[in-house]
Amino acid sequence: MMMKIDKKMSEAAWAILAENDRGGYTVPTAHLYPFQWNWDSAFVAIGFATYDIDRAYRELERLAEGQWDDGMIPHIIFHAPSDTYFPGPEVWGTRHRIPTSGITQPPVFGMALRQVHEAASAAGRPDAVERTRKLFQNALRSHRWWLRARDPEGTGLVSILHPWESGSDNSPAWDEALKRVPTSTKTTIRRKDTGHVDAAMRPRDEDYQRFIHLVDVYRECEWDPARQWEAAPFKIADVQMTGILARSTADLLILAQSLSSPEERGELERMHQVLTEGLARRWRQDLSRFVSRDLVSHRDVEAPTQACFIPLVALTLDDQQRRAIRSEIKRWLDGMVVGVPSTAPFSPAFEPKRYWRGPVWAVVNWLISDGLRMNGSEDLAREIEQGTVQAIERAGFCEYFDPTTGEGLGGGTFSWTAAAYLVLSQRS
Ligand code: GLC
């Protein structure tokens, strides 16, 4: 049965995306995040593909403008100045044509490109092949960068060197590793975020000092990937990042069948194999979830966070794993008004209002439900999708939601929440 599509809500979602448009790219929300963010834009492109294909392509094309010569697609593209965000371009000190940050974010780009291409082809757009081909090359170069720069030893898992790269900035998954990062900074910290939203919902000052310490270290490496790899005091082979990269690789492979050469297809197949094998090794039966690995302490990251479920988008699990992960997700949903919490409610680190330490994020639910559908759990996927849609209908297009009350928190008119609504409300 189709979910009932609320026309007024879809129109409100379109209005948010129009309001946050800054000329072919969408800011996550005005003031708090006034530039183009990497994975936000990829999700937004998928949202646009439900009603405006040209705009969907533009979103990805504008993101690709920020791609570095070495292939990295940065986490922020500073297309136009704004003084409502810290750290701005002067802190990053990178040297790309357009000012950008110096780190990256989850490569949802490949997943988005496939969906935009399929929507464009279904609509019979004459420019589909040409536009997709160009963006396919951007994606391929970025995947090469990932494997070269972030898995130099060929383990099949890519690493993050900064919590911001994960997209889950202050997740308890980083607590132990971050403790080793000094709080001293060369850059003067001028937080702007707490002027826009309640400080109790944001990362703490101490987290920010460590975040900026890491930026200082990598800027001193002149953003050279090999030097950063050596100098990194924070290095985590991340299952969320690897899961998304592996899935994007699979999506690029599908596009490659009609759009690229046999050599590139072979290259993508090899990448896909390496990544899925690496990821599969991170399953912990005793925990019923996947775990990241801290490459500095050589320990598993056992904190129960949403990242543990993201490999579902890339892997075909066996029956035992499916049963285990399903009941683990249900355990996390138990007693919640809306799920899936970004940190397990039974964890001592759980804080239902603080950013990535408990709140529910619509795009995370989008990924988890995709992965559940791929792994034969349509019913649970539907429950999560419907819960997300209803949470948005009740509380608005908020940045995230308190799982214990359903309250909408953080920024109020969020682009990727609007995109998630457009996509998830159409699911049956
Ligand atoms: C925060 C989130 C990150 C997101 C960004 C813009 O930094 O943690 O995932 O991309 O805001 O919305």
Image (cartoon, rainbow, N blue to C red):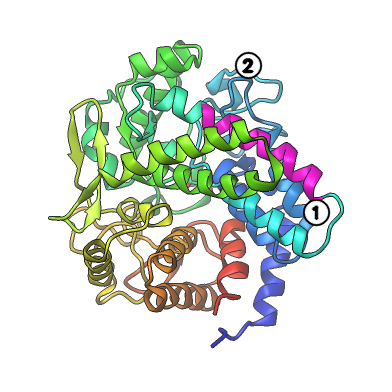
Whole-percent x, y for residue 29 in the image: 61, 52
Is disc 1's CB within 8 Å of ligand 1?
Answer: no
Task: Check disc 2 and give the amino acid type.
Answer: Arg
Q: Position of residue 334 (x, y in %)?
A: 25, 75
Residue visible at 69% across and 47% down?
258
Callout 1 amino acid = Asp
Q: Is residue 208 among the parts visible in the rendering? A: yes
Quarter of the image for residue 347 reads: bottom left
Residue 24 located within the stretch drawn in magenta:
no
Identify the residue under disc 1. Answer: 54
The quarter of the rendered structure image containing the N terminus is bottom right
Q: Secondary structure at mark 1?
A: helix
Q: Position of residue 13 (x, y in %)?
A: 66, 68
Residue in the picture at 27% in, 23% down:
182
Which residue is labeled 2 in the image? 95
Picture mark count: 2
| Ligand 1 under 8 Å from disc 2 Cβ | no
**Quadrant into which the C terminus falls:** bottom right
| Residue 336 horizontal side relative to residue 300, left or right | right
Magenta-drawn stretch contains 141: yes
Query: Residue visible at 45% across and 41% down?
Result: 272
Q: Residues within 10 Å of mark 1 (few under 14, many from 20)?
A: some
The residue segment tinted magenta is 128-144
Q: Identify which residue, 405 or 47, lies in the foreground.
A: 47
Residue 380 point in image, percent of width and height: 37, 75
- Mark 1 and mark 2: Cα distance apart in space: 30 Å
Q: Earlier in the sequence, mark 1 or mark 2?
A: 1
Q: Residue at x 62, y 35 (%)?
A: 262
- 127 up-or-down from 424: above or below: above
Question: Disc 2 on helix, strand or loop?
Answer: loop
* Residue extending farthest front: 262
> Is the magenta region chiefly helix, strand or loop?
helix
